[in-house]
Image: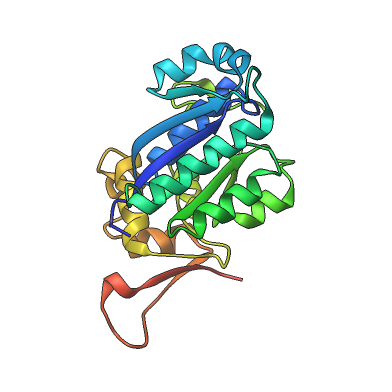
């Protein structure tokens, strides 16, 4: 994976509210460079989300099966898009945005094609989908705040930094400091150290608490280090 991963966001328009689409895009931006945005769903779903999809630069596709749209058709289309992107090497990360348990199969199929898959969905999203992705991000229960909403404005810089770090840890609670540092820089307009009152990434981790940086026993310097959540 490149230091700044390219990300494709695939939206299940039949199962995701407009506010949650905004939330997923904002979170994904903190993880890398979003280069592809696609949404698939029935015509009524696409029309109901037309403004947010247009505002955020999504390409929308209507799912049809013969003369009528079906849920299975939309799922199949998203799976095909994801696998095609993975096989072409277009992106390093694919973000699936849905609360549908059927997306567990889609996530596994895409992951088998060689890319990392992260998921977004409601807090009650079935475990099957949660376990099929390398990281799962639940939508806020009170709606999805954007960077311009009052809810987001109340998040202090320390909480924001911790959220970004947690979003880059795998199921084992581990992540790459180099990648996390780059995500923090993007999220804080290139000045996370100044905003958080530290001189180094290592100092930030010590200040936040709850994490540790481990050196690779085989050497390799900073690029080989691992950030781990303390037990």
- The quarter of the picture where residue 181 lies is bottom left
Q: Is residue 160 left or right of residue 180?
A: right
In this view of the protein, which residue sits in the foreground, 40 or 21?
Answer: 40
Q: Which of the 4 image quarters holds residue 36?
A: top left
Q: Is residue 141 visible?
A: no
Give how far across and how far down residue 19 sits, in percent. 56, 22
Residue at the (34%, 65%) spot, across then down: 202
Q: How many marks?
A: 0
Quadrant including the N terminus: bottom left
Most distant residue in the bottom direction: 218
- Please provide percent x and percent y for residue 163: 50, 47
Residue 25 in view: yes
Q: Image point 59% across, 15% down: which residue?
A: 43
| Residue at the image position 62 percent from the left and 28 percent from the top | 16
The coloring applied to the image is rainbow
User: Percent from the top left, x then y, of residue 169?
Assistant: 50, 59
Task: For the C terminus, give its image quadrant.
Answer: bottom right
Q: In this image, 130 relative to 55: left or right?
A: right
The answer to whether residue 35 is above or below residue 127 is above
Residue projecting furthest to the front: 66
> Quick check: 222 above or below 85?
below
Q: Is residue 97 above or below residue 210?
A: above
Residue 211 vs residue 187, the one in the foreground: 187
Q: Quadrant of residue 18?
A: top right
* Residue 53 locus on image (x, y percent): 46, 19
Above or below — where is 24 with respect to 171? above
- The front one of 156 and 223 is 223
């Amino acid at each position: 994976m490149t230091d700044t991963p390219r990300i494709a966001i695939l939206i299940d328009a039949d199962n995701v509210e407009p506010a949650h689409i905004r939330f997923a895009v904002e979170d994904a931006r903190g993880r890398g460079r979003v280069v592809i945005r696609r949404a698939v769903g029935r015509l009524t779903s696409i029309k109901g989300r037309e403004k947010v999809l247009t505002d955020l630069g999504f390409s929308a596709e209507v799912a049809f099966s013969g003369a009528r749209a079906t849920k299975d058709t939309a799922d199949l289309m998203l799976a095909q898009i994801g696998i095609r992107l993975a096989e072409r090497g277009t992106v390093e990360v694919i973000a699936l945005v849905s609360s549908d348990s059927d997306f567990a199969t889609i996530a596994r199929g895409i992951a088998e094609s060689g890319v990392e898959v992260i998921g977004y969905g409601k807090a009650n999203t079935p475990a099957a989908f949660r376990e099929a992705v390398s990281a799962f991000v639940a939508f806020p229960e009170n709606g999805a705040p954007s960077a311009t909403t009052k809810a987001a404005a109340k998040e202090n810089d320390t909480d924001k930094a911790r959220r970004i770090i947690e979003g880059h840890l795998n199921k084992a609670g581990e992540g790459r400091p180099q990648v996390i540092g780059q995500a923090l820089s993007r999220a804080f307009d290139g000045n996370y150290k100044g905003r958080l009152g530290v001189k180094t990434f290592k100092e930030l981790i010590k200040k936040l608490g709850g994490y540790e940086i481990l050196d690779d026993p085989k050497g390799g310097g900073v690029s080989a280090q691992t950030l781990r959540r303390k037990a």
